[in-house]
Image (cartoon, rainbow, N blue to C red):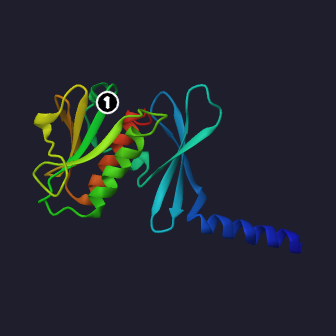
Amino acid sequence: MKKIILLTVLTILIVGCAGINVNKSAAYMYSNGDSEFKVTKVLFEKYVGYQVEYFYPNNPQPFFINLRYDPESLEDIEIDRTIFHKIKNDETIYITINPFENLTSKTTIAAMEIDKIIDNQYFFNIEVKSSMTEEYANYPIKTCNDATKESSVIWLKLGEETKITSEENCIIVEATTEDDMIRAADRLSLYLIGIMP
């Protein structure tokens, strides 16, 4: 009995030290109409997020995608479904913001949510760089006018509604708040890898 208690305590400590606590009771299957994906609520060290179980083609091992929001909570965000084809062959993608829009670290989190999918060697393996819409520090200046077929621009900006649109090779992630910016970033990420339509 003492051995079982010791093993249980050790397991709790190991999971706790990793900063992740998986809540199995908060899991559900998300369907995009073609496939199903297991989504599990996860307690990270400083926030509650979600893990989506994803299988690469011809690989029986699951890959877990950590996100701030789950697919069901993102279904209300409108997205331009031509975006995948606009970026899939890019060599570089710039994620750009207006440095004078008074954005906080929440927008940085949104950028990182997108980056970890696009820069991932198993998904797109496209180099992602930070930029600004206006001169600021040593960042390159990139706007929608600079977007090309080889180098798209993803512009994170505040606006009147939360949606993801595109103009030529520029993807515009617009949100009413910075929290919604993170939601929109997760929506874009899940669309790009085919979990959400």
Please identify the residue farthest to the right as the structure is shown: 1
Classify mark 1: residues with Cα within 10 Å, few (<14), some (14-19) or many (20+): some
Residue in view at x 10 percent, y 52 percent = 135
Residue in view at x 10 percent, y 35 percent = 145
Please identify the residue farthest to the bottom as the structure is shown: 2
Quarter occupied by the C terminus: top left
User: What is the x, y in percent for residue 139?
Assistant: 19, 51
User: What is the x, y in percent for residue 182?
Assistant: 32, 54
Based on the displayed image, in which of its 4 quarters is residue 57 positioned? top right
Q: Is residue 186 above or below residue 145?
A: below
- Judged from the image, the secondary structure of the residue bearing numbered disc 1 is loop
State the residue position of label 1. Answer: 91
User: What is the x, y in percent for residue 61?
Assistant: 64, 37
Residue in view at x 81 percent, y 72 percent = 6
Residue in view at x 61 percent, y 39 percent = 62
User: What is the x, y in percent for residue 99?
Assistant: 15, 57
The amino acid type of the residue labelled 1 equals Glu
Q: Is residue 91 above or below residue 177?
A: above
Horizontally, residue 2 falls left or right of residue 75, namely: right
Horizontally, residue 178 falls left or right of residue 30, namely: left
Q: Is residue 5 above or below residue 27?
A: below
Please identify the residue farthest to the front as the structure is shown: 138
**Number of callouts:** 1
Quarter occupied by the N terminus: bottom right
Q: Observer-nearest residue: 33 or 91?
A: 91
